[in-house]
Image (cartoon, coloured by chain):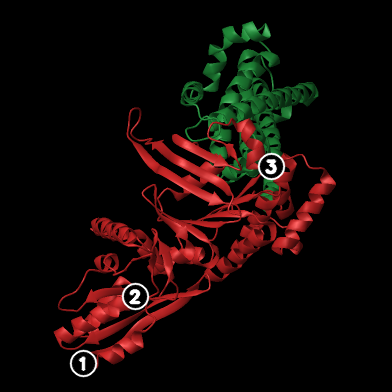
Chain colours: A green, B red
């Protein structure tokens, strides 16, 4: 029988490690969301725009992007992390550590974001875009002043959804020495049969997700009231 | 006075069928249209859905580019202009839509200010212009509402205000009243009429509702299968339509002419011959000839034929451009010879639509197509021959189309 070892957990030692893990997780998640989220937005706009009948209609560009995204997206992240190693070394200089984890996370996040952005932009009424064109708005102006504002509420919810996905990715970063809460839960909780530690990490992640989702819901609700 | 502002010259617009893929068939949405719209016109373009009218109107502000021919707007050939060069022209052309197409995340005031922002107006000028426009369309107290908080009619008013923001010379209205109820339609049409009269803005009005044309347009073109099949002053087209498609549209606006179902009922419930007499208060100039007034002395004709029994079944007379137009439907019965003589007599001064009897009915479309319209030459025998040719040619074509 394995007994819970909660009483013997040395929080004195674990506390600073936990704090560092939280910082690492936030560092990975926020950096990825910032970079991958922005690149994904751009790629998503291109993906949407080059669709047949849209502003920048271009069948070749659309098909190439669509193909690349479809190839990368289904790869399980832990495999992707390993597969990207040579590229990561080229770009970051090392394949170990937090920064080395951020690079493949950004790539995967860009792909996921672009798809989410595309799907949300598709729901914007084409008539509204036509109206803006009839007023003489340039295509880029339409993207920034009509398309994205019109899809803003669902886009914000999409980014909240993305946050959870990126958090999920960050938990696997421990595999390549990226640290973070995921690594903390596995190394100090699971592998030491210390469920108290595991659940502490889980609880922090739940709180993080709740906060982000709550804020996103509040913003989207305010936008949707219009 | 009549200065052309929009000129279509042999314009063709083809769309490639997407499903067919490469080398697939293409559809001709606009087929060799030559049309001039003059400054100050309220020009109605009417046709069934798929007739190509929405495509035609989008060629005016180059939302669509023609496959062939040229489109000249405000004196500029816009056929091959780049998007950048189109911008100043598009700012002179406002557009309103069936589904209003307002920005849902912008307030009413922000919607109206949008084209001003594009034009880099100073903020205080923007505010003043928006206030002016809100006042003009009667939505002053709704400035800070979002479109979802407005009714359909209010939304279209915002659309109109937005379209007028940069002081355009042309306003394109794409089925602008089709999503509105009849009362709101009238309000919006009145507003459009004010836009035309107060600011001298030329309005191009796309619609499938003939009563919209009747209410505000001064000129009209009828589109069918990508072509303009008939055009002219609204009164003339209403009073003496040539084409079957035009006649069908007019039948929907002028309730004087019974619809097909009602004709069936009338034939079933009455033994006699069902004949509609067209009421046309004014002579109509057409093809160098004149189509005379119709239905002006029905009572005296009836009085001259005491052997014919008459009962009035249905009818309605309306005014178009201030002149009476309509139809009255009778049941006529009596001995064959007398009835024929009577109808010949009546037909001399009036246009008749003969629906036949229950035993010997005339199909609805054919009855309308064969409506007896006599073109009287303006002067001289040569002109007479020419108009005779024109009218027989017309009859043949309408018969062909009726089948």
Q: Which residue is mark 2?
A: B258
Number of residues whose C-alpha sits closer than 10 Å to that of mark 2, classed few (under 14), some (14–19) or many (20 or more) = many
Number of residues whose C-alpha sits closer than 10 Å to that of mark 1, classed few (under 14), some (14–19) or many (20 or more) = some
Image: B15 above or below B48: above
Q: Chain of mark 3?
A: A
- Mark 2 to mark 3: distance in Å? 60 Å
Out of B105 and B301, give the one closest to the viewer. B301
On residue B307, the disc is 1
Quarter in which the N terminus of chain B is drawn:
bottom right
Q: Residue at x 42, y 39 (%)?
A: B12
Q: Which residue is mark 3?
A: A216
Q: Is residue B186 left or right of residue B54?
A: right
Between disc 2 and disc 3, the foreground one is 2
Q: Is residue B107 left or right of residue B219?
A: right
Out of B165 and A225, give the one closest to the viewer. B165
Image: B35 above or below A68: below
Q: Chain of mark 2?
A: B
């Amino acid at each position: 029988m394995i007994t819970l070892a909660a009483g013997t957990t040395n929080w004195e030692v674990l506390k600073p490690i936990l704090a560092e893990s939280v910082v690492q997780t936030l560092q990975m998640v926020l950096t990825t969301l910032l970079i991958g989220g922005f690149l994904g937005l751009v790629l998503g706009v291109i993906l949407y725009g080059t669709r047949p009948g849209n502003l920048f209609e271009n069948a070749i560009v659309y098909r190439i992007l669509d193909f690349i995204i479809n190839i990368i997206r289904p790869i399980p992240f832990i495999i992707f992390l390993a597969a990207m190693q040579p590229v990561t070394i080229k770009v970051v200089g090392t394949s170990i550590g937090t920064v080395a984890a951020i690079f493949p996370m950004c790539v995967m996040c860009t792909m996921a974001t672009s798809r989410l952005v595309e799907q949300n932009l598709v729901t914007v009424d084409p008539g509204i875009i036509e109206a803006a064109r009839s007023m003489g708005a340039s295509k880029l102006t339409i993207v920034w002043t009509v398309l994205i504002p019109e899809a803003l509420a669902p886009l914000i919810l999409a980014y909240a959804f993305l946050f959870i996905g990126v958090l999920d990715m960050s938990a696997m970063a421990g595999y390549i020495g990226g640290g973070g809460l995921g690594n903390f839960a596995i190394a100090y909780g699971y592998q030491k049969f210390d469920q108290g530690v595991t659940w502490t990490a889980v609880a922090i992640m739940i709180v993080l997700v709740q906060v982000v989702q709550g804020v996103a819901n509040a913003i989207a609700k305010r936008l949707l009231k219009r | 006075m009549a200065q052309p502002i929009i000129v279509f010259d042999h314009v063709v617009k083809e769309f490639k069928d997407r499903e067919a893929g490469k080398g697939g068939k293409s559809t001709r949405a606009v087929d060799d249209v030559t049309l001039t719209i003059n400054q100050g016109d309220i020009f109605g373009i009417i046709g069934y859905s798929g007739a190509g009218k929405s495509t035609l109107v989008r060629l005016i502000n180059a939302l669509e580019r023609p496959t062939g021919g040229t489109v000249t707007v405000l004196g500029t050939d816009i056929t091959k202009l780049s998007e950048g060069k189109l911008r100043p022209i598009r700012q002179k052309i406002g557009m309103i839509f069936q589904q209003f197409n307002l920005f849902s995340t912008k307030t009413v005031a922000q919607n109206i200010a949008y084209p001003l922002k594009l034009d880099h107006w100073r903020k205080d000028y923007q505010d003043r212009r928006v206030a002016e426009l809100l006042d003009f369309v009667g939505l002053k107290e709704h400035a800070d509402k979002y479109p979802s908080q407005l009714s359909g009619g209010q939304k279209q008013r915002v659309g109109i205000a937005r379209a007028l923001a940069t002081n355009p010379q042309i306003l394109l209205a794409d089925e602008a009243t089709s999503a509105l109820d009849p009362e709101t339609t009238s309000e919006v049409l009145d507003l459009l009429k004010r836009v035309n009269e107060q600011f001298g803005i030329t309005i191009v009005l796309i619609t499938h509702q003939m009563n919209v044309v009747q209410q505000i347009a001064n000129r009209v073109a009828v589109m069918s299968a990508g072509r303009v099949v008939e055009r002219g002053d609204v009164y003339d087209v209403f009073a003496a339509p040539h084409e079957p498609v035009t006649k069908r549209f007019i039948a929907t606006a002028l309730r004087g002419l019974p619809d097909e179902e009602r004709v069936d009922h009338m034939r079933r419930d009455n033994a006699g011959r069902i004949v509609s007499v067209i009421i046309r208060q004014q002579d109509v100039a057409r093809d160098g000839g004149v189509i005379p007034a119709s239905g002006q002395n029905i009572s005296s004709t009836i009085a001259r034929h005491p052997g014919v029994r008459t009962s009035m079944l249905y009818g309605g007379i309306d005014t178009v451009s201030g002149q009476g137009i309509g139809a009255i439907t009778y049941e006529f019965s009596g001995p064959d010879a007398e009835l024929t003589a009577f109808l010949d007599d009546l037909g001399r001064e009036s246009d008749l639509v003969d629906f036949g009897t229950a035993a010997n009915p005339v199909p609805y479309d054919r009855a309308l197509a064969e409506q007896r319209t006599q073109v009287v030459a303006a002067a001289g025998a040569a002109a007479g021959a020419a108009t005779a040719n024109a009218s027989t040619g017309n009859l043949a074509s309408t018969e062909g189309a009726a089948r």
